[in-house]
Amino acid sequence: PSCTTPFNDNPPEFDSPSYFTPVTKSVKVGTRLIRIVVEYLITGGNSSSKFKLDKTSGWITVASSLTSDMNRFFLIDLTANDRGNPPLSSRTSVRVAVTEENHHTPEFSQSQISATVPESLVVGTAIRTLSARDKDKEMNGLITYNITSGNDRGLFLLNSKTGVLSLAHPLDFEDKIQHDLRVSATDGGWIAKTSYVSVTVHVNDVNDNPPVFEPDEYFPIVQENVPSGTTVVKMNATDRDSGPSAVMAYVIQSSDSDLFVIDPNTGIITTQGFLDYEAKQVYHLTVKAFNVPDEERCSFANVNIQLKGANEYVPRFVSKQYYFEISEAAPKGAVVGEVFASDRDQGNDGVVYYLIFGKSRKKGFGINRKTGQIYVTGTLDREKEEKISLKVLAKNSGSIRGADIDEVFVNITILDANDPPVFTQELYDVQVSEGLSPGGLVTFVSAEDSDSVPSWSRFSYSIAPKFDQNVFTINPKTGQVSVAAELDRETTPVYNLTVLAVDTGTPPATGSTTLIVNLEDINDNGPTLTTAYAEVMENQRAGIAVATLTASDTDLPPNQGPFLFSLLGSGSDRFHCSLIPSSSGLLHALTVNPQLPVIPACSLAAESISIKQTCLRIYKLKYI
């Protein structure tokens, strides 16, 4: 394998092509002046060994006293060498100026400076000249001015050399009336010294904002026939200016009537003369707010005065009584009828509102308070209440004060609807024997229909089609439910039927109930032997147990065990059965003949002790 040695083609680089630092003549030996960050050597300009370079940290420090070198410049050449192959280098220079010691701090002539200007001051105008003195000479006595805080939006400009403070952006008294600035004066020493002064600029208001209405449109309401001098509305205008600049007056600039006047100082509009609602309902005024005496700064507002008529008349129903009919099957929201009352007043005073009053509110009806339309809100039942009388009031807006209403009775007849037949029981639960023969009675169901129309009250019974109608049947007239086929509890112990009562209406209405038929067990199933084969070893003693006999019965107690076991037919002379407490039996060998490898099959019988039922089964035994 071969490897490539990197070629050093990048020389070290300085941060700057040259450096400069001032230093006072009284600086102590060892003081750090400037740091150059690369590998370097002083290669020139340090013949007097006034300075020393720390190759590790890059700091150039004072190596000997500079007291005698006042106002002298030293130019130090630095060379930086890397350690590459080939080694590369770069050069730079550092200028060191030896200066006088900075003894004094600039001093302002005042500790607090203030100036007052109008908010209309033109941008660029000088506000104040700030002056500070420094007793040092040359650079140490050269002062630079600067605004250090309070000029966040740059409203002011400070000349850094002359100290002249001027306006950079327009002022607004309504936005801010005083600006607090902090100004610094910094000398030009190597270790600069700074002093500060607070400058407060006060802004005087000028009339630069017109009055403004808030809101700029008014909609007062005045009752007709009010006395002259009644207050209609108070106009509200504000001026962002202050003092004399904010003084304003009001005047009605235009109007379609001379029935209103305005107070020029307060802006209150009052009536003068007689207001008649029937003659005119709405008046339009334009009000002007202006500065005094400068009327050019002004604004306008519209005033729309609406007269309110006096309620002179009471609503009256056009009929003394109302008669309506509605079916008891009508859904909620169904309209029954409409009542109407009139009012001779105009405007809002002539608007009529309707309501159902007193106990009538609980009769299952509601009324539209604006239209007088009566509608169904509850469930109607003609059989409970055929005639309903509602007390309805007609009134104007506001509370009832006595004789300001009219009332009428609304008579509603509830018409019969085809209601479904209703069973006397919601659930029928009966028990019958599974041995009940077809045609046997299960139970009777009964329903009633109280409709007044004959065709609606006649009905017939049936069993819902989804159920097995081949097992049960029902007499459509009498409601007698009978067995239609053989029953077997072991197959279906419970039947859940839905019985219907359907009337002859158009369309027919149907009522339903649930019939649960529980079958009672009878002993209609014999025992079943579950053991059919056994083996016995030869040369066993007589009486040895050969097998445990078990049997089962699908009937319920007491139609099950215990059981008796017996042997019948061929081979029964060689074995006998005995009963054990668990309703099982033991088969014993009487004689064992090894010459007969297979005992002939014999019949084994199991018999229920409590209720006689016998089961026969062929049983095979084999010698081993």
Image (cartoon, rainbow, N blue to C red):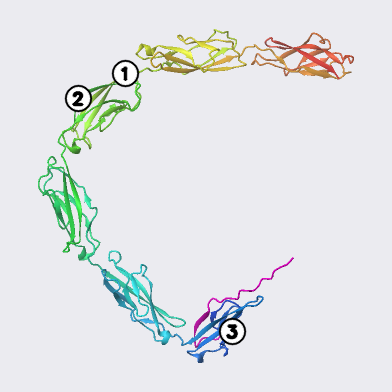
**For mark 3, what is the residue?**
42
Name which residue lies at 51% across and 84% down.
95
> What's the distance in space between the residues labelled 3 and 1, CA to CA?
123 Å
Three-letter code, disc 3:
Ile
Q: Residue 55 in the image: x percent, y percent?
A: 61, 80
Q: Are marks 2 and 1 in contact (CB under 8 Å)?
A: no
Q: Quick one: label 2, few (<14), some, or many (20+) residues within 10 Å?
A: few
Residue 400 lies in quadrant: top left
Q: Quick one: label 3, few (<14), some, or many (20+) residues within 10 Å?
A: many
User: Of helix, strand and loop, which mostly describes the magenta segment?
Assistant: loop
Q: Are marks 3 and 1 in contact (CB under 8 Å)?
A: no
Three-letter code, disc 1:
Leu
Q: Residue furthest left?
A: 273
Q: Earlier in the sequence, mark 3 or mark 2?
A: 3
Pick the front one: 596 or 151: 151
Q: Which quarter of the rendered picture does the C terminus lie within? A: top right
Specify whether 45 is left or right of 116: right
Three-letter code, disc 2:
Ser
Placement of 468 over or under 408, stated as above or below: above
Residue 5 in magenta stretch:
yes
Pick the front one: 405 or 499: 499
Residue 360 in magenta stretch:
no
- Tell me which segment is drawn in magenta: 1-29
Placement of 288 over or under 81, stated as above or below: above
Residue 281 lies in quadrant: top left
Give residue 319's mark. Answer: 2
**For mark 1, what is the residue?**
415
Q: Callout 3: helix, strand or loop?
A: strand
